[in-house]
Amino acid sequence: MQGFNKYYPPDYDPSQGSLNKFRGKHALGDRARKIDQGILITRFELPFNIWCGTCNNHIGMGVRYNAEKKKIGAYYSTPIYSFRCKCHLCSGWFEIQTDPKNTRYVVVSGARQKEEDWNPEDNGGFAVHDTDKEQVNIDPLAALEKTTDAKRLVETVQKPRIQSLQQTSEHYNADPYALSSKARKRFREEKKVEQNKRRSDDFLKDRYALPAGMSLLEEDEQAKEEARTEWQKAKLDRELRESKRRKTTLDIISIPATSSRLSRKASANSGSDALSSLRSRILQNTAKSSALGSARS
Ligand SMILES: [Zn+2]
């Protein structure tokens, strides 16, 4: 470890340069011990899983090495760096380089990279292959068939379709002025009717305090007739209900009023009522017994 403080020896002469120069040391210290070969020692972390080529051990992604970093070339203006690392299990060397073209790292020597690239087919997706092009090259007969099919399609389907479209277009574009004026006239009339209707609707809504967003039904003879019959039916129903209600309320009101009177009346009438019922019962009994007697004899 390097010291944090700087010791200036008594024989140090600032005019001769920095303290590093005076000591004969690089500013980066021990990491620059191979700087004369263009190598700087850096901490390098494995970007993927590898197998060491020397001891065949698996080395996991993220293991860090003191790697010898060296610029070995350039892709356009981007430098390509190589990192030489010493396996911590067997002291064999392996080299990994940057690949600016594909924005990745590649193992150059001394190890094998574990293939872990994302494959859409392994993950429920579909790989994109341009198979059409290849097939044309592989099978000329198929290509010929394809072109014949295409030609037939053009003759039988596409040409007539285009012709009919053209005819339609010509038909409608022959006299644009007349067509336009016709359409505009119709639109104007419709607009007038529409405006009248809206005005009357608004009037109705205003009158009955209906919400402005409410859309009213189209008014025609049938609708009017239906509405009239509906209204009359409802009116009749209501009257019927009203009369019934009145009657029942009358009954309800009359019952307690008469009950006391009835009870009083019952006590008064009980004699005559009981007498008449008794008479009828006796008559029935005698009729029954006489019938029974006649049957027995
Ligand atoms: Zn190894």
Image: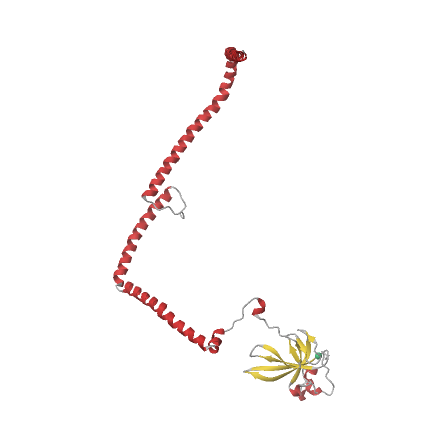
Residue at position x 69%, y 82% in the image: 93
- Residue lying furthest right: 10
On the image, the x and y values in percent for residue 27 come to 67, 83
The quarter of the picture where the C terminus appears is: top right
On the image, the x and y values in percent for residue 150 come to 40, 72
Name the image colouring. secondary structure
Q: Quadrant of residue 70?
A: bottom right
The quarter of the picture where the N terminus appears is: bottom right
- Answer whether residue 278 is visible to the viewer in this image: no
On the image, the x and y values in percent for residue 287 come to 51, 12
Q: Nearer the viewer, residue 121 or 176?
A: 121
Q: Nearer the viewer, residue 136 or 105?
A: 136
Say above or below: 126 vs 23: above
* Number of numbered markers: 0
Quadrant observed for ligand 1 in the rendered image: bottom right
- Answer whether residue 16 is visible to the viewer in this image: yes
On the image, the x and y values in percent for residue 229 come to 35, 37
Q: Quadrant of residue 178?
A: bottom left
Q: Quadrant of residue 23?
A: bottom right
Q: Is residue 155 left or right of 68 when viewed as pictured?
A: left
Q: Is residue 190 left or right of 8 when viewed as pictured?
A: left
Q: Nearer the viewer, residue 104 or 81?
A: 104
Residue at position x 33%, y 43% in the image: 222
Q: Is residue 164 left or right of 44 when viewed as pictured?
A: left
Say above or below: 52 vs 292: below
Residue at position x 33%, y 67% in the image: 160
Residue at position x 28%, y 53% in the image: 189
